[in-house]
C-alpha cells in the first residue's frame, strides 16, 4: 500500500497511538447480517488489530470478532484497503467491565516479563498475577511506591506502569492504560495461567 493509500484508509503508522505486533491467528468476523466470514489476525495491540478479510468492510461499521478458543470482541472498522482491515476493540459497557474486572481481578500466571525502570537496563522478572489494570511481579531490586516502570509482555509493545505497592520482594504495578479483556485472555494463555 502506498503512503497516499495508507492515509486515505486511516492506517498511517505515524498516527497510531500504539505499535502492533505480528501474529497469525485464525478467527471469524460477523457483520450486522449475522453471516460469519473466516479471517486471520495479522497484528495485535492492546486496543485493536489488523485482519485479512475476504469481504470489503465499511469504515465505522461495527463487527463481532471471534478468535478461536478465546471468545468474541465487539470492534469498529477503522480502515479497509485491499483485503485488510484495521479494527478498534469497542469500549465495554460499565456493567460488563465490572463483571470482567471481578472475573479477572487477579489471574495467577506462572511466567516472565521484561521490565525496565527509568535509566536502567531491561531485565526479566517473574509475574505472579495479572489483571486488566495491572500485575504483581517478583523483583530482586526493589522499587519505591510511585516509581515509573516499563513492562513488556512477549509479542506486544512496551506498557507504562506505576509501582502502587511493595511488600518483601513483590511489587504491584498499575498499567497507565488498562488492557482489553480479550488481550488479557491471550496473555494469560501465553503465560500458561489458569
Image: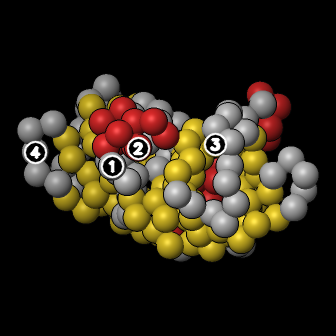
Q: Read off the residue under disc 2.
A: 5
Label 4–label 2 contact, CB within 8 A: no
Q: Is there any visible trace of residue 186 in the rendered image?
A: no
Using a 10 Å C-alpha cutoff, classify the residue at mark 2 as few (fewer than 14 neighbours), some (14 to 19) or many (20 or more): few
Q: How far apart are labels 2 and 3 at the CA level?
A: 16 Å
Residue 78: quarter of image? top right
For discs 4 and 3, the disc positioned in front in the rendered view: 3
Camera-side residue of 149 and 26 = 26
Element type at marker 3?
strand
Measure the C-alpha gap from mark 1 to mark 4.
39 Å
Of labels 1 and 4, the one closer to you: 1
Residue 46 appears in view: yes
Work out how far the residue at label 4 is from the one at label 2, CA to CA, in angstroms: 40 Å
The quadrant the C terminus occupies is bottom right
Sequence-first tag of 4 and 3: 3
Q: Which residue is mark 4?
A: 120
Q: Tell me the tag on residue 72.
A: none
Residue on which the image places disc 3: 77
Q: Residue furthest right?
A: 33
Residue beneath label 1, please?
Answer: 2
Amino acid at each position: 500500500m502506498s503512503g497516499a493509500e495508507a492515509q486515505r484508509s486511516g492506517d498511517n503508522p505515524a498516527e497510531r497511538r500504539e505499535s502492533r505486533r505480528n501474529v497469525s491467528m485464525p478467527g471469524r468476523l460477523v457483520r450486522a447480517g449475522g453471516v460469519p466470514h473466516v479471517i486471520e489476525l495479522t497484528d495485535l495491540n492492546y486496543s485493536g488489530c489488523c485482519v485479512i478479510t475476504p469481504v470489503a468492510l465499511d469504515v465505522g461499521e461495527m463487527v463481532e470478532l471471534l478468535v478461536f478458543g478465546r471468545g468474541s470482541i465487539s470492534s469498529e472498522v477503522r480502515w479497509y484497503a485491499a483485503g485488510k482491515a484495521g479494527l478498534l476493540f469497542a469500549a465495554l459497557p460499565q456493567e460488563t467491565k465490572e463483571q470482567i474486572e471481578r472475573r479477572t481481578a487477579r489471574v495467577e500466571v506462572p511466567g516472565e516479563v521484561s521490565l525496565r525502570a527509568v535509566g536502567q537496563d531491561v531485565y526479566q522478572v517473574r509475574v505472579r498475577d495479572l489483571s486488566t489494570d495491572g500485575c504483581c511481579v517478583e523483583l530482586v531490586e526493589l522499587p519505591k511506591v510511585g516509581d515509573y516502570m516499563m513492562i513488556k509482555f512477549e509479542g506486544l509493545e512496551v506498557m507504562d506502569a506505576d509501582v502502587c505497592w511493595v511488600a518483601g520482594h513483590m511489587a504491584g504495578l498499575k498499567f497507565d492504560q488498562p488492557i482489553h479483556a480479550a488481550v488479557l485472555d491471550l496473555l494469560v494463555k501465553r503465560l500458561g495461567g489458569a
